[in-house]
Image (cartoon, helix red, strand yellow):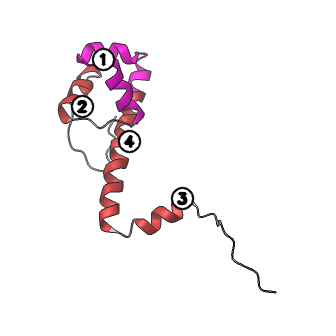
Amino acid sequence: MKKSPAKNQFTPLNTVIAKELKNERFRKSFSEEMSRLQLAHEIKTLRQRRKMTQAEVATKTDMPQSVIARIESGTHSFSIATLHKIAQVFDKHVGLVGQTQNRR
């Protein structure tokens, strides 16, 4: 008897991503999304290190707390103007840096 192929074969995510990264359009979108998510994570980390609440950051930026929450969760994109307001709260500057530079 012949074995039939498995119906639901598991493929690791990194394998799928590696394959898709060969596509230039996917690679560009993936890179942009990863940068946005990394920035959202860094904002949350800065806030937590300063022992600030989202409400405190929101007050200092004159934005609703829900906007800060959506930015930190990665479910909300944001403008450079919004990023600049948040950066000011943490005494940071918005700018372009090389990939290998320490950005903290």
Q: CA distance from mark 1 to mark 2?
A: 12 Å
Left or right for 94, reference 16? left
Task: Find numbered disc 1 in the image and state the secondary structure of the residue it sits on.
Answer: helix
Pointer 2 residue:
83
Whichever of callouts 3 and 1 sits on the residue coming sooner in the sequence is 3
Q: Amino acid at mark 2?
A: Leu
Asked whether the beta carbons under mark 4 and mark 1 sit within 8 Å of each other, the answer is no
Q: Nearer the viewer, residue 85 or 68?
A: 68
CA–CA distance between discs 2 and 3?
31 Å
Mark with earlier residue (2, 3)? 3
* Three-letter residue code for mark 4: Leu
- Horizontally, is 52 left or right of 99 in the view? right
Classify residue 59 by image quadrant. Answer: top left
Magenta-colored span: 45-74
In this figure, which residue is indicated by the disc labeled 4?
Answer: 37
Mark 3 element type: helix
Taking the spot 54% from the left edge, 58% from the top edge, the residue there is 13
Q: Residues within 10 Å of mark 3 (few under 14, many from 20)?
A: few
Residue 37 pos. (x, y %): 38, 41
Q: Earlier in the sequence, mark 2 or mark 4?
A: 4
Q: Residue 94, located in which quarter of the rendered image? A: top left
